[in-house]
Image: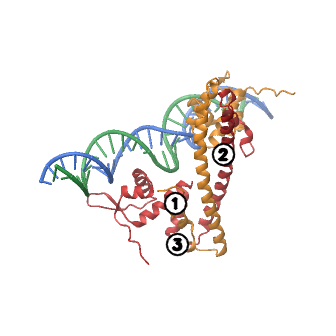
Chain colours: A orange, B red, C green, D blue
Amino acid sequence: MTKMAEIRDLAIGDLAKRTDTKVQTIRYYEEIGLLPAPTRSLGNQRVYGESSLRRLAFIRHARDLGFSIDAIRELLKLSDHPDLPCDDADGIARRHLDEVEDRIKRLRALEKELKRMLAEHRDHGGRIADCKVIEVLSDHSLCGHSH
Amino acid sequence: MTKMAEIRDLAIGDLAKRTDTKVQTIRYYEEIGLLPAPTRSLGNQRVYGESSLRRLAFIRHARDLGFSIDAIRELLKLSDHPDLPCDDADGIARRHLDEVEDRIKRLRALEKELKRMLAEHRDHGGRIADCKVIEVLSDHSLCGHSH
DNA sequence: ATGGAACCTAAAGCCACTAGAGCTACAAGA
DNA sequence: TCTTGTAGCTCTAGTGGCTTTAGGTTCCAT
């Protein structure tokens, strides 16, 4: 079995590229304590290793999928103390699932309307007078919940 | 055919309740020019009519579904000048549709993972050491795009 | 040795609200 | 009529999650 060479000595820019993050965002994560302060080179530049890369990859994926910084902080805290029971992580995941499902539902309603609008529009290639964009979006029926 | 009585003389709080918006948010929309400044009572309180209600309902639904204030501003501008061709509205709708579809796709991937995690979790109701929440989220395969 | 890219810090700006302080108006009951 | 409580008013500051800007320093290839 071939073992991957460990990744070492990444400059902040390299880390940024590998995780599709902006350099400033990495520094910001350090500032707010999501990423530990890395060692520095003689010239005071940040030098990262593989663990930073993994941690940042985790953060970015979680952010990308809609977890808040606070939720991520909790998850990271849990993963930093892996001998605790993980009902908390479970709770976070469950709460997030509810929200995700709700969002999907509402986005699908919007998707449908946008498609319908674009199709109708093509047919009698129109003027705003006939255009339903605004109507559709002020229509109450679109919003799934009851208010 | 029974014609609805027109809605008149809503206080800002009534408008807020009917549109599920905070009072401050309504004032904020006025400040940034999304809602026109309404007439005032003798005591300097805002008094709204039906058109404000419709306009705000539109804004809220659009916001709720992810349209930016700027996109909404454009749509409202178009609806305020209904004699112009509406290719612009079409463009906005189309751009938004792409984004909506992308978001749905990624949310579905997340939904699937969250469900899988929760299920596994229930099985050997565990400690974080066995817990896949963190693993799953640092895993590259979850992100659809290529980086 | 030098030019340019990449790094550094500190501070301000952005979006879309949200909350707070300190005040005034109005409607309902005693 | 007085009072009391709710809702309104303006103005300012705070929030989350970055992004931008200013004014430098360091690194590396030629």
* CB within 8 Å, label 1 to label 2: no
B13 above or below B126? below
Name which of mark 1 and mark 2 comes first in the sequence. Answer: 1
Element assignment for label 1: helix
Left or right of B56, for residue B144: right
Q: Nearer the viewer, residue C20 or B132?
A: B132
Classed neighbour count for the residue bearing mark 2: other residues with Cα under 10 Å, few (<14), some (14–19), many (≥20): many
Dividing the picture into quadrants, the one containing residue D21 is top right
In the rendered image, residues at marks 3 and 2 fall on the same chain? yes
3D distance between C-alphas at marks 3 and 2: 41 Å
Residue B136, position as x, y percentages in the image: 70, 36
Q: SS at mark 3?
A: loop
User: The residue under label 3 is which amino acid type?
Assistant: Pro
In the rendered view of the protein, which quadrant contains the N terminus of chain B?
bottom left
Residue closer to the observer: A94 or A25: A94
Residue to which mark 1 is pinned: B73
Q: Is residue B30 left or right of residue A111?
A: left
The numbered mark, 3 or 2, whose residue comes first in the sequence reads: 3
The chain containing the residue under callout 3 comes to B
Q: Specify which label sits upstream in the sequence, 3 or 1.
A: 1
From the image, tell me which residue sits under label 2.
Answer: B111
Which mark identifies residue B82?
3
